[in-house]
Image (cartoon, helix red, strand yellow):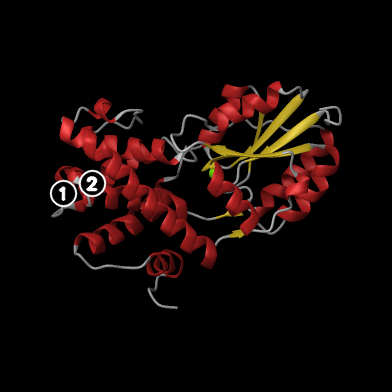
């Protein structure tokens, strides 16, 4: 590439480009529960006291925000099965018997379908780009090569990108993960960095994103709200910023996520069927009907 600019800026998709609030967190946890409930992994759950389960699940979840979906799933399942907040590559690592190891494919399939169903409904009804985003992209594209690096599966990422009407011409690459989750954001950032830029800045929204940036040896900036974009545009006048402060979910944030997921888990365990739309509407408005 001869027309490459000196520096590149890479955006995470969920959060920095499209604001989905706590929805994805709730979707990940609730879909993991549904996948266990609907398969042989149900035997590890506590129908009479689902609080036990959500308290375990959350331990795995907080370690993998923004990670590829099957990595997130396996970390949550690992907490349910063996109280260990670590993702696994193969189901035997969970220490379950052979029948359940075979059943794990079914669990992944159920998770995939349910999680995508919830995300699609929420994207249609509620999720939107942060207000300053389009202008920021346009401005930055003049001086920097722009990319997207996301934990979302490539095919879904490209669909989402188009769904929100972002302009592909302003980006040099839109890069997501593979279905197995072997390619993560660190991998993508490394590839971009190695393609010859002097400096690369990754714009993310989770502490996991900072971890990916460090692993790839690139700079980092955190976007949590629209105001952070104003901060970014000010700082960038003096060169690419680099923010290395780690942060965790606050207790309050986790309580909100937990209480919402627990409510949905109880409904699901009662046998009542809700549509994806009902669920996303309840998460976003507190009501099941429009
Ligand atoms: Mg994100």
Q: Is residue 43 left or right of residue 196?
A: left
Q: Is residue 76 left or right of residue 253?
A: left
Q: Kindly identify which numbered label has been placed on residue 46.
A: 1
Split into quadrants, the picture shows ligand 1 in the one at top right
Q: Quadrant of residue 175?
A: top right
Q: Is residue 126 above or below residue 193?
A: below
Percent across and percent down for residue 89 are 36, 28
| Disc 1, SS | loop
Question: Residue at (15%, 49%) from the top-left corner?
Answer: 46
Percent across and percent down for residue 185 are 56, 33
- Marks 2/1 in contact by CB < 8 Å: the verdict is yes
Q: Quadrant of residue 4?
A: top right
Q: Kindly identify which numbered label has been placed on residue 53.
A: 2
Q: Is residue 253 left or right of residue 124?
A: left
Mark 2 neighbour density, 10 Å: few (under 14) some (14–19) many (20 or more): many
Question: Residue at (27%, 57%) from the top-left corner?
Answer: 265
Quarter of the picture holding the C terminus? bottom left
Mark 1 neighbour density, 10 Å: few (under 14) some (14–19) many (20 or more): few
Can see residue 252?
no
């Amino acid at each position: 590439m001869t027309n490459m600019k000196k520096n590149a800026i890479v955006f995470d998709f969920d959060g920095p480009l499209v604001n989905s609030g706590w929805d994805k967190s709730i979707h990940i946890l609730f879909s993991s529960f549904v996948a266990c409930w609907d398969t042989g992994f149900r035997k590890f759950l506590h129908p009479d006291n689902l609080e036990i389960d959500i308290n375990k699940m959350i331990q795995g979840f907080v370690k993998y925000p923004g990670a590829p979906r099957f990595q997130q799933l396996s970390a949550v399942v690992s907490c349910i099965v063996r109280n260990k907040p670590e993702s696994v590559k193969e189901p035997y690592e969970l220490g379950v018997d052979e029948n359940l190891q075979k059943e794990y494919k079914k669990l992944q399939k159920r998770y995939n379908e349910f999680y995508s169903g919830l995300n699609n409904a929420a994207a249609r009804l509620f999720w939107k780009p942060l207000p300053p985003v389009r202008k920021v992209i346009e401005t930055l594209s003049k001086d920097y090569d722009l990319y997207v690096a996301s934990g979302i599966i490539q095919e879904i990422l490209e669909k989402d990108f188009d769904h929100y009407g972002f302009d592909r011409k302003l980006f040099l690459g839109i890069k997501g993960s593979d279905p197995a989750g072997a390619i993560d954001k660190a991998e993508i950032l490394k590839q971009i960095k190695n393609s010859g830029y002097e400096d690369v800045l990754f714009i993310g929204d989770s502490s996991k994103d900072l971890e990916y940036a460090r692993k790839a040896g690139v700079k980092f900036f955190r976007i949590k709200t629209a105001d952070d974009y104003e901060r970014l545009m000010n700082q960038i006048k003096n060169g690419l910023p680099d923010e290395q402060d780690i942060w965790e979910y606050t207790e309050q944030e986790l309580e909100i996520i937990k209480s919402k997921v627990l409510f949905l888990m109880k409904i699901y365990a009662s046998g009542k069927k809700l549509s994806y739309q009902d669920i996303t509407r309840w998460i976003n408005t507190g009501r099941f009907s429009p």
